[in-house]
Image: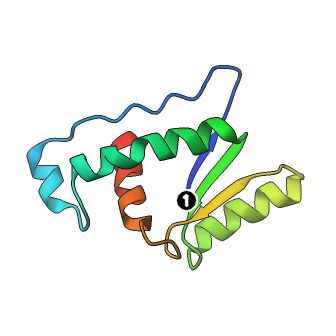
Amino acid sequence: AATWMKSSAKAQCKPRRLPAAVQTRWAHGNVDTASKYADLVRSKVDSHKVMIFSKSYCPFCAKAKSTFKDMGVSYEVMELDVIDNGSDIQDSLNVIT
């Protein structure tokens, strides 16, 4: 799960260009496609104290969501496997992080 938490400093999400060898290993999209979704990711992170980019079937994602729920921390979640552009958003997260 990609989890972003805001601290006192504003969260920074800056896309970076990866080496060509890394780009060819990606299962979906490319850096150009990923950068299209970087603004969406930034917007989501800026709009929520805790933003979780998740897959509905991922046990680690479920544990992260459960932990925040148990702590009483509200969070926003985007299930990447149930939305049409989820793989593109995931590619963007790979570039950003």
Please say whether residue 77 is visible from this viewpoint. yes
Residue 90 relative to residue 26: left or right: right
Q: Count the labels in the image.
A: 1
Crowding at dot 1, Cα within 10 Å, few <14 / some 14-19 / many 20+, comes out as: some
- Looking at the rendered structure, the secondary structure element under dot 1 is loop
Residue occupied by mark 1: 1
Q: Position of residue 56 (x, y in %)?
A: 59, 76
Residue 97 visible in image: no
Find residue 54 and report its horizontal and vertical position in percent. 57, 64
Q: Is residue 2 left or right of residue 8?
A: left
> Along the line of sight, which residue is nearer the eye, 94 or 76?
76
Residue 45, compared with residue 70, is above or below; it is: above
> As rendered, which of 1 and 33 lies closer to the eye?
33
Tag 1: amino acid: Ala
Q: Position of residue 82 (x, y in %)?
A: 53, 76
Seen at 71% across and 21% down, the residue is: 8
